[in-house]
Image (cartoon, rainbow, N blue to C red):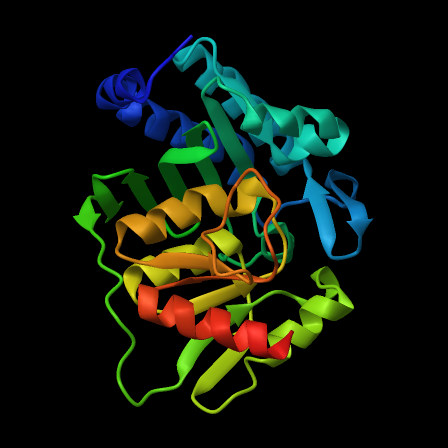
Amino acid sequence: MIESTETIEEFLAQHACDVEEEIRKAAATEIMPRWRRLAAHEVDQKAGPHDLVTDADRKTELYLTEALVALLPGSAVVGEEAVHANPASYEAIRGDAPVWIIDPVDGTRQFVRGDEGFCTLVALAQGGTPLASWTYAPARGRLATAQRGKGAYLDGERLFAGVPEPGRDLRVATSHPDYTTDEQKRALLGLRADGVAPRPCGSAGLEYLALARGESDATAFSWEAAWDHAAGLLLVEEAGGAHLTLAGEPFRITGGNALPFTAARDAATARRVAGLLADGA
């Protein structure tokens, strides 16, 4: 078992490209052959009509679980579909072993509709800290990667989130109302302020990529599932961004956060959005 951050860094130095290759293979084998070809029996609901799962989700997660554990013996996996089947498996994220955090198809609704706005998210974490991440949008042929302390990249080019353009409304992607409590809805109302242009979010992973690229300014999300956030938050941090919860603290992938929380292109924007959310609450 890997016992230190240094040995994880050694693993990444040797095998980060192997992880990337397995993610590409999983998408080529299990996702793209089903894109725009899904049969009715390949799509199911979990919690409701906005919470879908497909054969692509299930089979991609199984593929990556086997491949990534083989690359890193002794590692654990926290995958969206496995946790749905066995909620206790989420506890691995709080353990000492390195853990792969997997969202096989982030943006399943878009995938089912035949849109391009979906991606596969993988993060490698230990002790509750994301250390590396991969965001792969197979329909667009784009791969974003990050390693803690080593920067964020899109198809090999360094990403810098920058700062919002002065005088322009902040572009903020927000949680779908179906995934917010009444209290969180009140907090999100704080974004209906001068100088802010909120809109519904799409795939969380692609929203984080938009932040890291400077194409969006902030997010305001109301749920904690690590598979939606671990990869993207590291990508944003390594591109120069920041994240804060309603309590003014950085978001923890292990849970227990005051929600909603924001991720933003820079620390000043994160503080501004978090303040607006607090005012609404």
> Does residue 165 appear left or right of residue 129 in this picture?
left
Figure quadrant of residue 239: bottom left
For the question of whether residue 33 can be seen, the reply is: no
Q: Nearer the viewer, residue 53 or 112?
A: 53
Image mark count: 0
Above or below, 124 against 242 in this view is above
Position in image of residue 77 (x %, y %): 55, 23
Task: For the N terminus, give its image quadrant.
Answer: top left
Position in image of residue 84 (x %, y %): 73, 34
Q: Residue at x 27, y 62 (%)?
A: 161
Above or below, 162 against 49 in this view is below
Q: Residue at x 63, y 53 (%)?
A: 223
Q: Nearer the viewer, residue 136 or 94?
A: 94
For the question of whether residue 188 can be seen, the reply is: yes
Q: Residue at x 79, y 46 (%)?
A: 45
Above or below, 35 against 264 in this view is above
Task: For the C terminus, give its image quadrant.
Answer: bottom right
Q: Residue at x 48, y 27 (%)?
A: 100
Position in image of residue 209 (x %, y %): 38, 56
Single out the residue that lies furthest toward the left.
157
Position in image of residue 231 (x %, y %): 43, 42
> Does residue 32 appear left or right of residue 195 in this picture?
right
